[in-house]
Each structure stands twice: as C-alpha cells, then as structure tokens.
Amino acid sequence: MYWTVHTYGGPRRVNHAAVAIGTSIFTFGGYCSGVDYKKFKPIDIHILDTEKLKWWKLELNNQDCSCVPFQRYGHTAINLGSNIYLWGGRNDNRVCNTLYCFNTETLKWTTPSVYGNKPEPRDGHSACIIQNCMYIFGGFEERSGLFASDLYMLNLNSMVWSIIKTKGRPPSYRDFHTATAIDNKMYIFGGRSDWAAPRQTDKDKYCSDIYYLDTSRRQWIRPKVHGVKPIARRSHSAFVYNGLFYIFGGFNKNKDLHFQDINRYDPVSSTWMKILPKGTPPCARRRQICQLVNDRIFISGGTSPIFPKPVIITRLQDYDLGGPMNVPSNLKDHDDLHVLDLKPSLKDMCMVNVWENMEEMKIDNINDLHIPLSLKHDMAAFDPFEIMETEINMMQSYEENFPVLSL
C-alpha cells in the first residue's frame, strides 16, 4: 500500500456523506465551520472524477424543490445500482427521517413513498445495504434526546420499513460509529455512547469491540478477536477490500486523541492488524469521507484540532460547529484529497521511493536527479509527501472557482 496523491482545493466539508459509483464519487452535504446551517437551502452535491482527480459542483436545474433534501450533516447515503438513497441527518434547526433518492443517470431527486414502521428522525446513525435492503442502526434521536440501539430495515424492492427483532446481545447505544457489509453480515465498530446511556450527560463512553449482525439469522454476535484492537473511537471511516475490513482516523474525546492510523480486521481469523502503508498519510482527523474505487481509497475532508481551543456550547460540540456565525470552532476543516493505492503500479512505487530519497538527501530540484524525463514530468505534477496546512479562515469560499456540471 502506498499513499500516492495529496492535493487540496476541493470541497471544505465535514460530516458529509459519499457514495462511489463507477469512477465517480458523489458527496452530499456536510458542514463547514462558521457557516449558517439554520436555513433550509437545498443540499449541495460535489462529484470527484477519480481518474482526472478533479472536483465538480453539480447544479440541478428544473428540479422540483420539494423533492430535494435540505442541507444537512450527520446523514447517511448508500446506493443500489444507479440510485443513491439518502436518509436522516439534521441542520441547526431540524432532524429528518424522510427518504430521498438521487438518480445518478437522470440527476434528479425524488422522495419515494415508503410504508411500515419508519424510524424516528436521527443523526449520527449508520447505514449499509445487504441484499437490496438498507439497514439503519443507532444514532441520536433529537425528539427524545436519547441514544438509539435499535435496528431498522428498509426493503428497497417493496419500500417497506420494519424494525428488526434480533437474537443475541446487540451493540450498546451509540452514534458516530460505522456499519460495514461483508457478505450477509453487518459489522459495527466504534462510536460514542454515554455512561448514562440512553441519556446523554456528556460523560462519553467508547467501545473497541466488534459486533456483527448475521442478517440471515437476525442474530447479533460479538466475536472473540485476536491481535491488537484499535483504540476505541468515533467519527472514523471504514471500508472493505478483498473481504477485509479497514478503519481509518477518528477521535476519542476521553483521551483527547485524533487518529491517522489504519487498522485491518480479518473476519475469517477474527484478527486485528495495524497497517503501515508507505508514504505520508493524511494528518489525524475525524468526520472525513472514505471511498473505495477499484484498488484505490479516496479520503477527503474532515476536521482536525487547532490551538488555542475556544469555548463552544451545547450539543453543537458534538458536531464541532462552534458558536454563532463567524465564531471559530476548536477545529480546522479540510479541503484536501488523499489517495491510498492498495495495488500500486511499479511506476507509482518508483515515484514514491524517489520522493522518499529526495527528502532524505535534501534534494529540492527534480532536475538534479538522474532519472528518465517522463518520470520527472510525472513527479512534477504533485508532491506525494507535501505537508499541507489548511487555512484557519473557514469562511473562505471555494464554490466560485469550482467547475459546474449542469443538467
């Protein structure tokens, strides 16, 4: 594994949702510190062309506004074919439980009719798809002010919601965890709970155990694991590659730690292992997006601590939104993009090693190297070990410079 690309200038977003379809990554919503999220403006959509490494902002013209979700954070997005289903989340005024569908071929939003026992509005939940069914677990219910540990399923064929009665001991109340599908199993890792759960008292509790739901038997299982378990965390990312489950980043408030590590879980041997890719990883962060496209992982956005830390109030601390508009939070939001190549070519590995040797030998000029001219041109395109500082000015607007895709 090699970290091969580090760029910036993309959407400055935190706690957004993303789906990869083909070679494109669609991102929805999220927030940027210091921006007003009390208004019900339409959710924004950004698309990353993973081949050209170029971001686009999608403008939807002639769209029925009643079918478009409002700008939000803490939501989830999954896809079935060319349709992306967005559910849950909130802005500063309201939590939502309406199901939205975005068709990536027509570039249109719809609100499908659903039936059955619909979940209460929530944010910080998880979602994954197994056999044409979307499973929703956990989160925080704003109406009751309680953490959730219930499990809901939406059959995307019949559009019927149902609450699932399960066997075994389920994961504890939590939000900001991950749910990852491998075959017919849904793996739950991490998240934040409270010692007084389901109530929230600001006494955070974290869990480093893995649970999985066997959807064929509707049974929760906590497997015995081997190896060194990752430190418990929330707001991390998870992905699956070749049947193995990986997590990246996250945050533990009790330890006041942000993470930049990658840990791998093998469900067959039930073993954790820390992975150390070559190259320079993204800085420690939380609430980023992480998507697999072919043999590459694309990580974008998220937030990291800055100092000194100003005081922020109430549940806004959970989303790090800070105080009123223009009042800075204690975190800086990123607009960067990092690529982890899981199956790098010889050329990519060569470039990474040349950059490493240049750093060790303190060589600044590529032209001082005795390497092929074509490799010099490729290396001049980007520095894979560039250390980027995200601007403290969170109000800086990038939309004015974004290429626009219009329907």
Image (cartoon, rainbow, N blue to C red):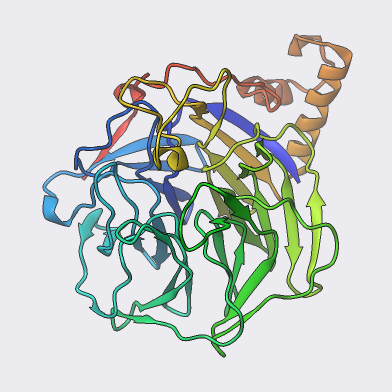
Q: Which of the 4 quarters of the picture holds residue 43? A: top left
Question: How far across and down, in percent of the image, does residue 77 sit?
Answer: 40, 58
Asked if residue 359 lies left or right of residue 341, the reply is right
Q: Residue at x 56, y 49 (%)?
A: 203
* Residue farthest along the bottom direction in this orientation: 217
Q: How many marks?
A: 0
Placement of 399 over or under 241, stated as above or below: above
Q: Which of the 4 quarters of the picture holds residue 253? A: top right
Question: How far across and down, in percent of the image, does residue 135 sit?
Answer: 44, 73
Q: Is residue 126 visible?
A: no
* Residue farthest along the right direction in this orientation: 361
Q: Closest to the observer: 385 or 265?
A: 265
Q: Which of the 4 quarters of the picture holds residue 153? A: bottom left
User: The C terminus lies in which quarter of the figure?
Assistant: top left
Placement of 333 over or under 161, stated as above or below: above
Q: Is residue 332 visible?
A: yes
Question: How far across and down, in percent of the image, does residue 376 sit?
Answer: 72, 20
Asked if residue 285 lies left or right of residue 38, the reply is right
Asked if residue 406 lies left or right of residue 253, the reply is left
Q: Residue at x 61, y 43 (%)?
A: 251
Question: How far across and down, in percent of the image, does residue 175 sit?
Answer: 49, 57
Q: Residue at x 45, y 48 (%)?
A: 25
